Amino acid sequence: MTALLQYLREGFSTVISGVRRTAGAWRPQQLDDADFRRVLDAMPLGVTIKDAEGRILYSNPADAALHGYEERDLVGKPAGMLGAPAARRTAGTGPTPPEGAWLRGSWNARRSGETFPVQLRSNVVRNTSGTVLGVVTTCQDLTEPEEAIGNTIRRGLEDPLTGLANRAFLIELIHRAVARLSRHPDYRFALLYLNLRHFRAINESLGYDRGDLVLLASARGLRDVIRPTDVAARIAGDEFAILLDGLGELTDATRVAERIAARFEEPLKLEEDEVQVTACVGIAVGRSDARSGEQYLKEARVAMNRARAEERPFEVFDPVIHRRAVERLQMEADLRRALQRQQLYVVYQPIVDLQTGRVTAFEALARWEHPERGAVGPADFIPVAEEIGMVIPIGSWVLHIACAQLAEWRKQFPDHRDLSINVNISVRHLRRSDIVEQVSETLRETGLPAECLKLEVTESTLMEDADNQVTILRRLRAAGVGVAIDDFGTGYSSLSYLQRFPIDALKIDRSFIARERGDSWDIVRMIIALARDKRALAVAGGVETEDQARELRDMGCDRAQGFLYADPLRPVLAAQMLEG
């Protein structure tokens, strides 16, 4: 009892509800144990302290009188004797919950046997080493007026349909867990967020009454798989949350999630039949950098949505992954506006004849100058554009800008009228039924001859739907447009299909050029031979040194591009290169 008093005296204002109202500006840490006990004795709110075995160590006069006892009648007795018979059965057989803090409406019994409604607020008390010292419970009599009090309990603490805790109550408990974590770094808790799959279909097909029965059965299922000290709550609709308070290890949270998933694999028993629903669970674990209950609910819900998307039973919230996801969503939003706000621009990387060193073509490349992030590389935003459907309007815009630019250079530099422009085209763009008509219209609008345009398609893109791609490429070739296979050598395409593709150039992937002499250069030789067999140009990408250029020249490679010749250039610098 002495150790408990000392602990409570030091942290009384955060342990027992109502002290600040009773004591005003009183500072509990200034009291000695005797003074502190006198304060407890004087409190109008019932206070009970029990040890780790569930035996009553102390009952203040208000609590003893409320139940019709003297304090001496209660000390040493099991605390369960104060509960009404039904409440004792609900509470289970364990004398003291091993962890947690919880607020609940219940029913207690007086010595006479009369039962009455109460609001109980309990806190597990541990010493600095984590050993359980006991449990402190405050008891508020809610008898007058009983109907109003019952409504208060239901509205303030419980979800009216399932009897689980409601959102507001759960938020309060999370706040308390966060405060405890700030005082005791070894303390562990977790929040689970649960969603029922197919619940909407049940509501729509069977009716809302049956849907309510599913929610009730789900609530029972949750009670079956959690500890008495854990708090299950209904957040909204078919979404539930569970606060796991005072975990031994954080892996305990995943084990609870596994039990929940297993429980919901079994059919839910309704009044006369069964319904099959499954659940996905998100887990947010207590962290020192997270401060609000709402934040934990949001994190657990994010993890739950990820579990749903990945079709997994549960997922643990990862702050790093979440930050990246948020950044990705922001990039999507920014990219949708980038074209309208003229943040995208086109640069041009020269392609040179390895024998003469003359510029024969440019590859047009999209770039993005973000107003806040600065330059965003194509490796970052092109995959995003693919996923959100922006790659087609971006590709169409690049095609038009590049064709118009080359048409202008052909007029500006008559000696370079044999120049061509290479434009990358995505698989989504290539699959459009009007792709040939769109390309032809762009050429007409810009005045660029069709033979001056080459569309670059990656090898992996061609192999996704090879039969259909062959047809499209043949139509483009019939319109006079050239075709180059980009990143060749990385997609392991079938040689039988390759023979069917109407191509004008094979672009050797830069990864083969960057490696030391060896097997990769044997692959380069084979690609050059294959291009020669197809009567197509062999173009090496990523050429950075004179030695690489010399080796490629000796192998019979036709063209090359890379930093050895120039970085991708803005139009003004590319024009200067043509002038020189």
Image (spheres, grey):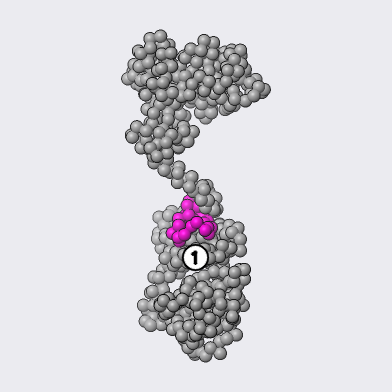
248, 155: nearer the viewer:
248
- In what element is the residue under mark 1? helix
Determine whether 214 is above or below 88 in the image: above
Q: Which residue is mark 1?
A: 179
| Quadrant position of the N terminus in the picture | bottom right
Q: Give the residue drawn at x 35%, y 16%.
A: 408
Segment colored magenta: 276-305
Residue 293 highlighted magenta (yes or no): yes
**Can residue 42 be seen at all in this image of the molecule?**
yes
Q: Give the residue drawn at x 39%, y 22%.
A: 571
Report the side of 274 relative to 394 (left or right): right
**Can residue 95 be seen at all in this image of the molecule?**
no
31, 543: nearer the viewer:
31
Q: Give the residue drawn at x 34%, y 32%.
A: 342
Report the side of 509 relative to 120 (left or right): right
Residue 509 image point, x, y percent: 56, 24
Residue type beneath disc 1: Ala
Residue 239 image point, x, y percent: 45, 59
Q: Give the residue drawn at x 52%, y 70%.
A: 101
| Quadrant position of the C terminus in the picture | top left
**Which quarter of the picture shows residue 328?**
top left
